[in-house]
Amino acid sequence: MEIWIYEYQESWPSDFQKVKEELAFDLALAKVSYLSIEHVGSTAVPGLKGKDIIDILIVIPAANFKHVILQQFKGALMLGEKQGGYYYLGNGGVQGRWSFKLHPGDPDTERVNRHVYVAAEGSMPHRNYLALRDTLRKEPELRDEYGAVKLEASVGEYHNIMQYATKKNDIIRKILRKAGWSEEEIDEKESQAVKDWPHKLEI
């Protein structure tokens, strides 16, 4: 697979807002409760290069991170009136989250390209997403350094996205240290990556 990295697009925040509103509609219709819908990943950081994919995190109470709630999210995201057409990717390569992606056969080519994740409040994925986003928003030099690493790492062919992600480990550790994380916390975060995903799908 090839990785394409783009300059920051001014449309990314409004793209997120549109998807957020439609997700909120479908989740309400399906009576699925959540705490917040967050714009995360590179497209959430003004000025940062990134893949042209809006990463969205739906945060739920820790007590709700269980199979019966997962089934509710599957129903809302696969069959929703406004945001249907997703398929479930297990944890998407990171333990402690649920991952959804638009079905590749989706006929609506105008839909914003996005990944939707669900994680429990206070979980490692939740903390990681917000720490990276918030730190990079406040640290332009670190943001630009991260963008340069992403661009360099995008050169070449990969068997899966986790191989590309591994190339960013050092700079991500640097960002998380800046966010105040301990080495033990960072090690724990790295240990939750499923190295052979997607061949090993886990919830």
Image (spheres, rainbow, N blue to C red):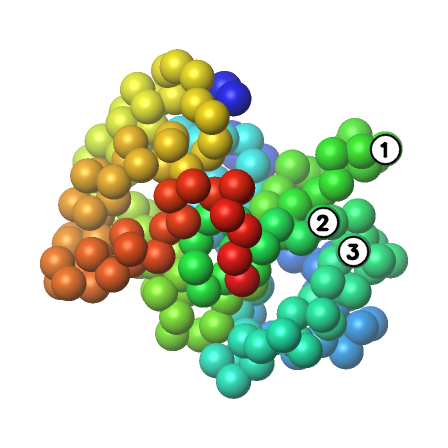
Question: Mark 2 touching mark 3, by CB under 8 A?
Answer: yes
Q: Residue at x 72, y 70 (%)?
A: 71
List the single residue furthest toward the bottom.
63
Find disc 2 in the rendering and name its residue.
87
Q: Residue at x 38, y 43 (%)?
A: 195
Seen from the viewer's position, the closer of residues 48 and 199 is 199
Identified by mark 3, the residue type is Met
* Residue 54, visible in the rendered structure: yes
Badge 2: residue crowd in 10 Å (few <14, some 14–19, many ≥20): some
Q: Earlier in the sequence, mark 1 or mark 2?
A: 2
Which of the two residues, 5 or 185, is positioned nearer the viewer here?
Answer: 185
Residue hosting label 3: 78
Inter-mark Cα distance, 1 to 3:
14 Å
81 on left or right of 119: right
The earlier-in-sequence mark between 1 and 3 is 3
The image quadrant that residue 23 belongs to is bottom right
Residue 69 vertical placement versus 128 (above, below): below
Q: Count all numbered tags in the image, as a single digit.
A: 3
Q: Are marks 1 and 3 in contact (CB under 8 Å)?
A: no
Q: CA distance from mark 2 to mark 3?
A: 6 Å
Q: Report the disc number at residue 107.
A: 1
Coordinates of residue 81 in the picture (x, y in percent): 87, 58
Residue 4 in view, yes or no: no
Q: Residue 139: horizontal and vertical position, in percent?
A: 22, 45
How many residues crowd mark 1 within 10 Å: few (<14), some (14–19), many (20+)? few
Q: Quadrant of the C terminus?
A: bottom right
Q: Position of residue 129 (x, y in %)?
A: 39, 56
* Residues at marks 1 and 2, CA–CA distance in whole angstroms: 14 Å
Q: Is residue 107 above or below residue 101?
A: above
Q: Amino acid at mark 2?
A: Tyr
